[in-house]
Amino acid sequence: MRRIASPCPFMNPARPRAGFTLIELIAVIGILAVLIVLFAGVVGRLPGVGDRAKSTSNLRALHLALDQYMDDHNQQWPQQPMFSAAQQKQYEDWWLDALKPYDIKPVTWQCPAILRLGKIQQNGISPRIHYSPTMFDGRPNTAFRWPNMPWLVQIANVFGHGPLLILPDGSVHDWDTYLAQHQKR
């Protein structure tokens, strides 16, 4: 039995077809568009995730340095002098110098998200210390007497859930989560 050749070269079943149909091409472009949108959302959040991880690392390094400071000073929290709001530079210098023997560099006091955003100013100048230490009295073990009292608090809400804080046990929380956990108790 003899086959009759098709008048259209694209309809010849004996010849493999070359290329894609229009529907296949549209489907591939649609899938790629969806993947690009999803990937762009993830990539947009990456700097924030990295900044939060670095900020958490900075808080833990400062916590460790404060813990070592207290070990060397009869379990007493660093007793800073009282500074007025106009003496921000002296306040920052005092804290930078207090923890310098524990290998704390000035960059450890800075949150990468605050540096990247560059929007925080106090008294018209950008602060060099982005984590504010709590003031405790000079009695031994005062910093450990209140386990829910943060040792350091970030000066700005740059991650969307309140500023980060670190507790005496070394755990880092954002303010909103911390409050929610402690209001349940």
Image (cartoon, helix red, strand yellow):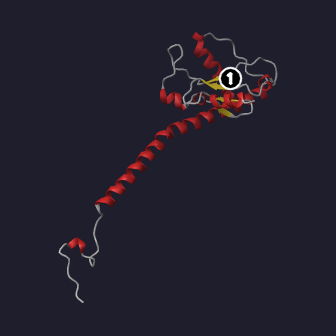
Which of 109 and 153 lies nearest the eye of the viewer? 153
Residue lying at the far bottom of the rendered structure: 1
- Identified at 64% across, 11% down, the residue is 83
Q: Judge from the rendering whether residue 102 lies leftward or rightward of residue 122; answer left or right.
A: right
**Can you tell which quarter of the image residue 137 is in?**
top right
Which of 47 and 7 lies nearest the eye of the viewer? 7
Q: Secondary structure at mark 1?
A: helix
- Identified at 59% across, 23% down, the residue is 155
Q: Is residue 37 above or below residue 8?
A: above
Q: Judge from the rendering whether residue 154 lies leftward or rightward of residue 3; answer left or right.
A: right
**Can you tell which quarter of the image residue 86 is in?**
top right
* Residue topped by disc 1: 98
Q: Position of residue 46 (x, y in %)?
A: 50, 41
Characterize the local packing of mark 1: few (<14), some (14-19) or many (20 or more) Cα atoms within 10 angstroms.
Answer: some
Which three-letter amino acid code belongs to the residue tagged 1? Ala
- Identified at 61% across, 19% down, the residue is 92
Q: Position of residue 150 (x, y in %)?
A: 70, 26
**Can you tell which quarter of the image residue 55 is in?**
top right
Q: In the rendered image, which quarter contains the C terminus?
A: top right
Q: Judge from the rendering whether residue 32 lies leftward or rightward of residue 129; answer left or right.
A: left
- Identified at 54% across, 16% down, the residue is 122
Q: Position of residue 180 (x, y in %)?
A: 67, 30
Q: Position of residue 11 (x, y in %)?
A: 24, 73
Q: In the rendered image, which quarter contains the N terminus?
A: bottom left
